[in-house]
Image (cartoon, helix red, strand yellow):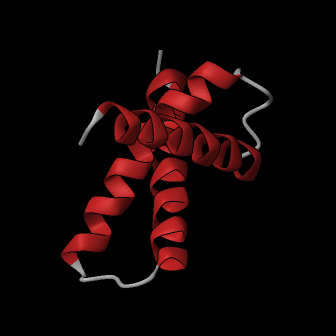
Amino acid sequence: MGIIGFIIWLVIGAIIGAIAGKIMDDGHKGFLKNAILGIVGSTIGTFAGSLIHARGNLLHLVLSVAGACLVIWIVRQISNKK
């Protein structure tokens, strides 16, 4: 992956993080936090899609958003224990 591909990956992850933040109603915790969680969640969702041999951009988008929602939920559970 070149630098342009990396930048596109970051931008798409940030957008997915914003979408997941809205779905999970995170109380506007901040764009940077949502972007980071979106990038991580998108990576997890894409990996899960590759495990089940998912086909199609829409399915990958749904899996990426679901992965980001999962990561937001996990972070909430960890931070609520403190």
Question: Which residue shows up at 63% across the image and 43% down it?
Answer: 15
Is residue 72 something that shows in the picture? no
User: Where in the figure is residue 62, as x and y percent of width and height?
Assistant: 54, 69
User: Where in the figure is residue 40, as x and y percent of width and height?
Assistant: 39, 39
Relative placement, left or right, of 19 versus 80 is: right
Relative placement, left or right, of 40 versus 61 is: left
User: Where in the figure is residue 53, as x and y percent of width and height?
Assistant: 24, 83
Residue 33 occupies quadrant: top right
Please tell me which residue lies in front, 45 or 75. 45
The relative height of residue 45 versus residue 36 in the rendered view (above or below) is below
Please tell me which residue lies in front, 18 or 57. 57
Q: How many marks?
A: 0
Relative placement, left or right, of 25 versus 43 is: right
The relative height of residue 43 versus residue 28 in the rendered view (above or below) is below
Question: Which residue shows up at 51% across the image and 61% down it?
Answer: 66
Residue 55 occupies quadrant: bottom left
Relative placement, left or right, of 4 versus 50 is: right
The quarter of the rendered structure image containing the N terminus is: top left
Please tell me which residue lies in front, 67 or 77. 67
In the displayed orientation, state which residue is furthest to the left.
51
User: Where in the figure is residue 24, as x and y percent of width and height?
Assistant: 69, 48
Residue 32 occupies quadrant: top right
The relative height of residue 32 versus residue 60 in the rendered view (above or below) is above
Question: Which residue shows up at 34% across the image and 61% down it?
Answer: 46
Is residue 60 something that shows in the picture? yes
Question: Which residue shows up at 79% across the image and 27% down it?
Answer: 28
